[in-house]
Image (cartoon, coloured by chain):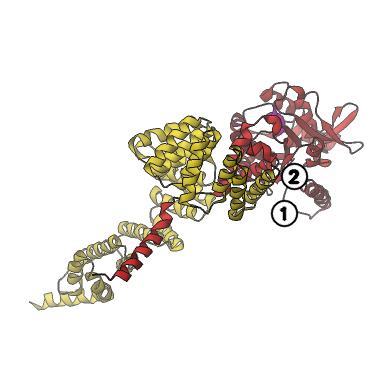
Amino acid sequence: MNSLNFCTILLTIFIFADTSFGLKANLEEHQKKSSYSKTLSKSLIGINIVKNKKESLKELDLLAKSFIDEGSYNRALDIYDKILDQKPPRKKIFEYYVIIGDLYNLKKDYNLSLEYYKKALYIRKNNAEVMVKIGKIFFEGNLFELAEKMFLDALKIDKKSIKANRGLGDLFYKQGLYAKAINYYIKIPKEFYEREIIRNMADSYKNLNKINEAIDILEPFLEKHIDYELMFDMGLIYMNMNNYEKAKEWLLKSLEVKADNFKNCIYLASLYDLTGEHKKAIELFNKAYDLDSSYASVDFMRASLAYKAGRIKEAKIYANESYKKAKSIFVKDQVTKLIKFLDRK
Amino acid sequence: MIPIKSSIFIIFVVLFSVYPSFAEVQGFNEENFFIDVLWRKAMSVEEKQLPKIALVLGGGGARGFTHIGVLKVFQEERVPVNLVVGTSVGSIAGALYCAGASLENLQNTIKDFDKRDISNFSSISLLEMLLADRLLSNKKLENFINARIGEVTFNQLQIPLVCIATDLITGERILLREGSVAFAARASSTVPGVFQPVEYNQRYLIDGGLSENIPVSVAKIFKADVIIAIPLSADITKNSVNNIFLTLMQAIYIQGQSLDQYNLSMADVIICPDVGDLNAANFAGAYKSIDKGYIAAKKSIKEVKIAIINKIPERVLIE
C-alpha cells in the first residue's frame, strides 16, 4: 500500500468515524435479528474498506430501511439523523424528511411528524402527497378546518389525488357531513374503493336516507366478499327501508358467517318481534342471552314477548332482571315504565 | 410432560380468556338499540297516538341559514313535526319548511344570497335613509319566499306554522297564522330602524325578536308535548360596547337574553348550533353556517328521539 492510499483510508476513517462508532452499539444488537443488516453492519464496523460518501449514504439508507421493516423505528430514526448529518443532496433530504415524518407518525409523535413534513414541504412547496400527510395529522388531531385546507391545497395541485379525496371524504364523514363526504368519495375511482370507503359511503347514504345508493355500493362488494359486518350493515339498511324480509335475509346471512355475533342476534330478534314471529324472536333473544347475559335489553325484550304471550309472571321476572342490569338513565326509565305497566296487570 | 394440575390450570386460563370472544359485543350500544327499537315502534303507530312535536326556530338574521341544516336532519331522520313556531329569520325558514320546499335546492341556490335579494338595499336607498329619514323596504322578501313556495296561505301549509311579530305601537307579541305566509314571514323579519314597519290589521308590525326571539311559550300555548328549540343567539360577550349606540344595543341584547333563557327553560330539547360568533348582518358566506346547523342537529337527534319516546304512553310501545 502506498502512502497516498494510506492517507485516503485515514481520511475516510476520520470522516465516518462518528457515524460508525455511533452505529456500533445499535448494529451489534441488530445483528442478532437481521441477517441482512448483519452483513451490512459488518462492513460498516470494520471501516477498513474505502467508500465514498454516496456509497456510505446508500448503505446507511439500506440499514435504516431494514430497521423500519423490523419495526425498530427508533433505530431507524437514529440512522436517519446520521444520514442528515452528512448533508445529503437536497433531493434526498426531501425524501428523508418525509420518511422521518412517517416514522414519527407511526410512533404517534404527531408534533415531530408534522415538523418533518413541514420541512419537506419547505423543499418542495407543491408536493401534494406531503400535504395529504399533513392533512391526515390535522385530521387525527380533530383539527378539521386545517385538515380540510391541506387536503384542498393538495387537490389544487393534483386534481385527481386519490389520497386527498379520501382524506376529505373521511374528514366530512367523521364530522357527520355525509353529503360532503360522498362528494369526495365518489371522485375516487371504483377500483380503489377499500372496504372502509365502502362502509363509510354506505353509512353516509343511509344517513342521508339515500337507501338505494347505500345498497348499490354495498351489494357489489358483498357479491365478491364474505363480510359479516357489512352484511349486518345491509340488514340495518333494509330495516331502515322497512323492508323487513330483505333485512332478515341479510342479518341471517351475517349470522351464518358469524354465529356468535351478539349484536346481530339481538337486532334480528327485534325484527322477528316487529313482524310478529315471536317464537323465532324468543329463540334469538335466548341465544343472545347465552352469549352475553349482562344487557338489560335482552331481558326487556323477553319481558315484552312474555307479556304478549300472556305470561305476566314470567314477564315481571324478566323486567325486574332488566332493571338490575340497566346502565343508562334512558334504559332505566323504559324498564321502569314496563315494570309499572306490568304491575297494573 | 405437563403435570395434571398445571394442565387443568391452563385449560381454565384458556377457557376464561376465550370466553369474551364468544359474544361479539363490540360496537353494541344498548341505549342506541333501545332507541332504535322503540323509535321503530313509535313510527309504526297511528299519528294520533304520538305526542305533538313542535319546532321553535329562533331569530338571528344571517345566522338563520343555520336552520336549513337543522331542518335537513329532521327531514332525513323522518321526525314527525306537528307545529313550527318561528321568529324573524326563523319564520322564513319555517315558512319554507312547512310548505315543503326542497331544502337541498334551497341550500344550493342561496350560496350567492345578498341583502338586495330581500330588500331595496342600495347606496341611494341608504342615502335616503340617512338624509330623508326614509327606512328601507323588505317587500322583496315576500317575492323571495313566494318564488320558492308559491303564494300559499297558512291553511295550505303541510305543517302548521306560527310566525311571531311585534306591534310597534303597543309592544304586543303578535301571532300570525292566517293569510299569506310570505307576508307573515316578512312582517316577522322587519328589523326596526332599518325596514319600514309592515301594516297589518291597523297595526304596525316589526321583527318578532323584539317581543320573543325564541318563542317556546307560543308552542306551549298550542299544547305541544315535545318542544325542540333552536336558538341562534349571538355571543354577547364578544360585542363591543365602546360607544353609546353599541352600549344601548348591548342593553337590548342583555334584556332579550334573559327572556330567551326563560323561554329555553321550557323546551324539552335545545339544539345549539355553534354560530354565536357570526354577525347577524353579515350575509356574505353565511350559507356556510348550514353545516353548523346540520352538525348540531345530528348531535342532538338522539336526545330528540328520547324526548319523543318518553312522551309516548308505555301501552303504545309495549302492546
Q: Earlier in the sequence, mark 1 or mark 2?
A: 1
Chain where mark 1 sits: B
- Which residue is labeled 2 in the image? B267
In the visual, does A215 lie left or right of A270? left
Where on the picture, by quarter, is residue B178? top right
Q: Colour of chain B?
A: red
As shown in the figure, which amino acid type bears the numbered disc 2? Answer: Ala
Residue A279 appears in the figure: yes
Residues shaded magenta: B92-103
As shown in the figure, which amino acid type bears the numbered disc 1? Answer: Lys
Q: Is residue B273 magenta?
A: no
Residue at coordinates 44% horizontally, 40% vertically from top-left? A232
* Badge 1: residue crowd in 10 Å (few <14, some 14–19, many ≥20): few
Q: In which quadrant will I find the N terminus of chain B?
A: bottom left
Q: Nearer the viewer, residue B279 or A8?
A: B279
Q: In which quadrant will I find the C terminus of chain B?
A: top right
Q: Nearer the viewer, residue B311 or A85?
A: B311
Q: Colour of chain A?
A: yellow
Residue at coordinates 25% horizontally, 72% vertically from top-left? A27
- Image height of A135 relative to B82, above or below: below
Residue found at the very far left of the displayed protein:
A1
Residue at coordinates 35% horizontally, 57% vertically from top-left? A94
Say which element carries label 2.
loop
In the visual, does B152 lie left or right of A199? right
- Which residue is labeled 1 in the image? B238
Magenta segment, prevailing SS (helix, strand or loop): helix
- Image height of A47 relative to A250, above or below: below
Q: Which mark is residue B253?
A: none
